């Protein structure tokens, strides 16, 4: 009895902070999503709107497009980062000259604030000033203008995110790989397995928990990306790189449509949870079927 | 199944010499035990045979075929690791069948072979379990079955029993020996446990500091050690050593006079606890330091010749601490070593004169 009271007392500060910064704002957003509330409207008071905001979402072509773009973006960046990160981590498990220098330089993007990443990439992509348009024209004859070609804008945002976040994936996978017991791998080698079979049958299954965690973190990050993209393209040209985060920002701040913005945020959260859950189910189901 | 030959095999890591020019021939079907303290190079030797380590120089032959640079995948050896190295996400059946799966053996045939291997180690009831649901002994048997499943040329076991409890270890020891005899495979077994080595081996290779100290049958190693290290490593309790001086064929140390000693100058006398007979007029005079009853016998720790020695005596024998004790050792059981290099000083001719006070 006494130990349980002490336990709760010790936990209290953490719980208080969590409630204040996590639970309350969430409940607040949940409540607002059921109101019409626009500070600069004729009637600035919140008005009960029941499920109207959510009904509006389903038919909002702009919002649906931003969801589609975000999913596409997430798929591209997470897949590329995991594949690239795994390859780099495998490389760093070996010894090669200047490995430490390479590892340090490779990790640099991680330490740069997203807003600075966006600014740097913007500088590099400005036509007539940045090196990227210059060399693309010079070497490949490509007319590279972010503000004109949606595909180029989308690709640039994807490449920037890969550049920024692959080191994170590399580091987590590297940590997982270095903790992997060597005996099963050696055993498989003696058992007659080829290197690709060892990777498929031994390394990959053993890395599954690390991979899942990494992929979850990256999916959650990618789904709510805002700052870098805002600096590079402002969601343009048109709305071609306006991902959910940017879209919500536009609804909530310039348009001050708080209720509708809250509804969008909730749906995004819900979507994130569902995606992660589906992925988890898919990745663990394979194991059950095997046994 | 094949013979294994190592010719001047060396292995270095930077300036550290793990193996110093090893020469060893293991005939087809032999049960060979590599024995030695940790860091003596026995595991390195095994990993070189498996192909997990490359030699720095030297040659490795399977029968007459040079496999020094052959990838482990193509050597067709089977290995059991100390911690079994089971694939944790595969069932017992999948674990055993993995060597067949990766080499593309037909599925129906593979299933039969898996069953066959599982039967040999009595695992047929556990085929659908995961390794984490098995006991230590069962995991050990899975590792054995996985090694058995594909008819390897050489069978390697790296301290396979050290993770088991004492009782199971004795049982598995007998099973492994029986298995080796029944399939007649060349088996190389690494251990630091001399009892395991003595009970299992056709021949023992005793190693220390990257060098072979002695190769021989368990009896040869026990009765006829080549140097102080071998004499002190094998046997429980280990051999007793007394340092003294040989002059005119007589070994002398405080309280000890043993005639019939070879050579001259400083020498170390070695004898085993069980070769001792108590006798009031014995050539060895000492005092009882401690008494250790073990149930089957009573061991006396005796201070003699400036050293401590263990004597095996009758189980009922309980002398008082500090009391004088005198004993004899047959001349044939008195071994002499050179204390500076540790090598055995052998008698020029058999000399079976009984030791007299």
Image (spheres, rainbow, N blue to C red):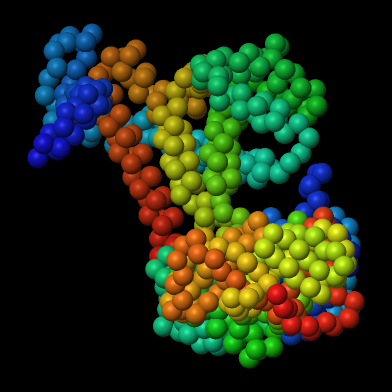
Looking at the figure, which quarter contains the N terminus of chain B?
bottom right
> Where is residue A196 shown, x and y percent of the image?
66, 59
Instruction: Looking at this view, name the residue that lies furthest to the bottom.
Output: B182
Q: Residue B77, located in which quarter of the rendered image?
A: bottom right
The residue closer to the viewer here, B52 or B235, is: B235
Q: Position of residue A90 (x, y in %)?
A: 65, 45
Q: Does residue B28 show up?
A: yes
> Is any part of residue A194 visible from this angle?
no
Q: Find residue A171 and report its horizontal and vertical position in percent.
A: 56, 36
Instruction: Tell whether B301 sits left or right of B100.
Output: left
- The residue shown at (55%, 47%) is A179
Does B129 sit above or below residue A20?
A: below
Q: Which residue is drawn at 59% across and 60% down?
A: B303
- The mark total stands at 0
- Describe residue B173's horizontal placement relative to residue B23 as left or right: left
Instruction: Residue at 78%, 83% (x, y): give it.
Output: B353
B29 sits left or right of A21 in the view: right
The residue closer to the viewer here, A283 or A143, is: A283
**Residue A263 vertical placement versus B63 (above, below):** above
User: Which quarter of the picture shows residue B226?
Assistant: bottom right
Task: Identify the residue at image location x=85%, y=70%.
Answer: B249
The relative height of residue B35 versus residue B176 in the rendered view (above or below) is above
Q: In which quarter of the image is the C terminus of chain B?
A: bottom right
Write down the quadrant of residue B245 in the picture. Answer: bottom right
Q: Which of A151 and B270 is in front in this view?
A: B270
Among all residues in the image, which is located at the extreme left? A1
Q: Position of residue B55 (x, y in %)?
A: 83, 58
């Amino acid at each position: 009895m006494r130990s349980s009271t002490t336990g709760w007392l010790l936990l209290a500060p953490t719980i208080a902070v969590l409630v204040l910064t996590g639970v309350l704002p969430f409940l607040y957003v949940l409540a607002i999503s059921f109101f019409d509330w626009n500070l600069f409207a004729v009637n600035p008071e919140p008005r009960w709107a029941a499920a109207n905001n959510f009904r509006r979402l389903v038919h909002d072509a702009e919002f649906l497009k931003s969801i589609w773009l975000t999913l596409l973006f997430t798929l591209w960046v997470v897949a590329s980062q995991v594949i690239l990160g795994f390859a780099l981590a495998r490389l760093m498990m070996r010894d090669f000259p200047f490995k430490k220098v390479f590892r340090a330089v490779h990790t640099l993007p991680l330490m740069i604030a997203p807003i600075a990443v966006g600014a740097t990439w913007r500088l590099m992509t400005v036509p007539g000033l940045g090196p990227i348009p210059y060399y693309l024209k010079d070497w490949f004859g490509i007319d590279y203008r972010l503000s004109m070609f949606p595909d180029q804008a989308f690709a640039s945002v994807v490449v920037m995110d890969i550049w920024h976040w692959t080191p994170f994936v590399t580091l987590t996978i590297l940590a997982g790989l270095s903790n992997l017991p060597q005996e099963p791998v050696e055993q498989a080698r003696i058992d007659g397995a080829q290197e690709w079979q060892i990777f498929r049958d031994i390394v990959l299954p053993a890395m599954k928990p690390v991979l899942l965690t990494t992929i979850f973190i990256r999916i959650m990050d990618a789904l709510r990306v805002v700052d870098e993209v805002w600096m590079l393209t402002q969601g343009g040209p048109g709305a071609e790189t306006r991902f959910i985060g940017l879209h919500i920002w536009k609804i909530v701040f310039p348009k001050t449509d708080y209720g509708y913005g809250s509804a969008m945020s909730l749906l995004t959260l819900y979507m994130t949870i569902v995606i992660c859950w589906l992925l988890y189910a898919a990745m663990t189901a394979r194991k059950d079927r095997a046994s | 199944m094949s013979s294994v030959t190592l010719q001047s095999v060396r292995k270095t890591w930077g300036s550290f010499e793990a193996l110093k020019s090893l020469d060893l021939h293991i005939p087809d079907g032999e049960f060979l035990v590599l024995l030695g303290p940790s860091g003596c190079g026995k595991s390195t030797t095994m990993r070189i045979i498996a192909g997990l380590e490359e030699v720095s120089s030297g040659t490795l032959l399977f029968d007459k075929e040079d496999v020094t640079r052959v990838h482990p995948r193509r050597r067709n050896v089977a290995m059991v690791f100390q911690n079994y190295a089971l694939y944790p996400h595969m069932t017992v059946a999948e674990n055993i069948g993995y060597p067949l799966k990766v080499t593309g053996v037909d599925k129906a045939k593979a299933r039969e072979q898996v069953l066959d291997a599982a039967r040999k180690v009595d695992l047929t009831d556990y085929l659908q379990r995961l390794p984490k649901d098995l006991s230590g002994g069962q995991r050990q048997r899975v590792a054995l079955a996985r090694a058995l499943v594909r008819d390897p040329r050489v069978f390697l076991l790296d301290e396979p029993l050290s993770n088991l409890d004492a009782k199971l270890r004795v049982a598995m020891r007998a099973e492994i020996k029986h298995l080796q005899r029944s399939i007649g495979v060349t088996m190389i077994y690494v251990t630091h446990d001399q009892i395991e080595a003595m009970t299992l081996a056709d021949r023992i290779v005793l190693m220390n500091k990257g060098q072979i100290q002695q190769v021989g049958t368990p009896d040869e190693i026990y009765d006829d050690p080549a140097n102080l290290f071998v004499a002190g490593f094998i046997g429980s309790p280990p051999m007793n050593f007394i340092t003294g001086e040989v002059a005119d064929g007589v070994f002398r140390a405080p309280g000890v006079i043993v005639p019939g000693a070879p050579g001259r100058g400083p020498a170390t006398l070695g004898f085993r606890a069980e070769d001792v007979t108590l006798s009031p007029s014995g050539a060895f005079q000492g005092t009882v330091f401690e008494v250790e009853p073990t149930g089957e016998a009573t061991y006396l720790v005796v201070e003699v010749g400036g050293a401590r020695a263990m004597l095996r005596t009758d189980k009922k024998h309980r002398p008082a601490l500090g009391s004088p004790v005198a004993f004899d050792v047959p001349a044939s059981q008195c071994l002499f070593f050179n204390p500076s290099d540790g090598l055995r000083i052998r008698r020029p001719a058999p000399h079976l004169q009984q030791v007299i006070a």
